Image (cartoon, rainbow, N blue to C red):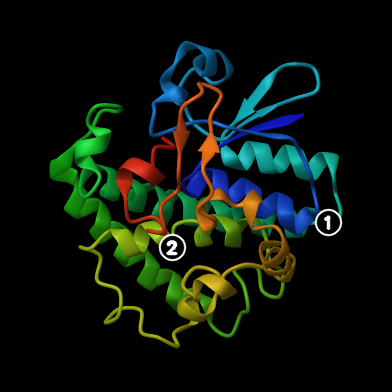
Amino acid sequence: MKLYDSMGPNPRVVRMFMAEKGIELPKQPVDLRGGENRQPEHLKRNPIGQLPTLELDDGSYLSEITAICEYLEEKNPNPAMIGSTPEQRAECRMWTRRVDLNICEPLLNGFRFGEGLKFFQKRIPCAPEASPGLKMIAANRLQWLDGQMGDKDYLCGKRFTLADTTAGSTSAVKSASRSIPPTPRLPRGSPVWESGLRRKRNRCFGPSVRKFRASRLPTYPEYDHQITTGASGSSFSPPPCFGKCAANCFDTA
């Protein structure tokens, strides 16, 4: 298998998931800034041009982060990042769906149609008039999620799961979307702030990822600033903006 990788929140979910499970796969970086993901070679792998994309052993391709992570868990059940029982798996899928549908999608599109419009309008259909409303939805759902956390450590209680990696992947976008009011609705110390979604960057991952990041930063291109060369031959350097530059960070849709 091989993972076609890039910067951005969606590839980050899969890398975090793999790190927690101790999965090592060859990775081929795709130059997003250079538009490599929109070229015929990548469109053969994923006709919608998204990243990440997983090449399977039989030569077929799998995309969509939840599908990729579900497949990797089926192939590598332990440690379980989705669940070891039907009840655990259902709980994780429930929270992953809630976070993805109610927070990630409106938040990412609010950013793409707002701060990232100049970059994205050349790549995907954009509705700039929808940006404020989408951000309002994301802020409302973040507030709702805060009320749901209670005294839980993570979205699924004591378990760090795919739901947390999905939620944590949007933290940089949250910082970049200036129109989403952070502190009045989700004050420092609130349950979501202390959970995977709103905790500080160096605490928003499970223990395996924290250890992994400390020793193997090159596997997380957005956290190191090495020059990375895509298959097209053009190079790009992930900037130290941690997600505030649309042109460099968020072309994963």
Residue 51 vertical position relative to residue 84 in the rendered view, above or below: above
- Comparing marks 2 and 1, which lies closer to the viewer? 2
Q: Secondary structure at mark 2?
A: helix
Q: Residue at x 81, y 41 (%)?
A: 74
Q: CA distance from mark 2 to mark 1?
A: 28 Å
Q: Residue at x 20, y 63 (%)?
A: 179
**On residue 179, which mark appears?**
none
Badge 1 amino acid: Ser
User: Label 2, on which residue?
Assistant: 171
Badge 2 amino acid: Ser
Q: Residue at x 38, y 67 (%)?
A: 142
Quadrant of image for the C terminus: top left
User: Label 1, on which residue?
Assistant: 84
Q: How many marks?
A: 2
Q: Secondary structure at mark 1?
A: loop
Quadrant of image for the N terminus: top right
Splitting the image into 4 quarters, where does residue 48 fall? top left
Is residue 98 something that shows in the picture?
no
Q: Residue at x 35, y 79 (%)?
A: 186
Mark 2 or mark 1, earlier in chain: 1
Q: Position of residue 168 (x, y in %)?
A: 52, 62
Residue 8 vertical position relative to residue 35 in the rendered view, above or below: below
Q: Position of residue 173 (x, y in %)?
A: 37, 56
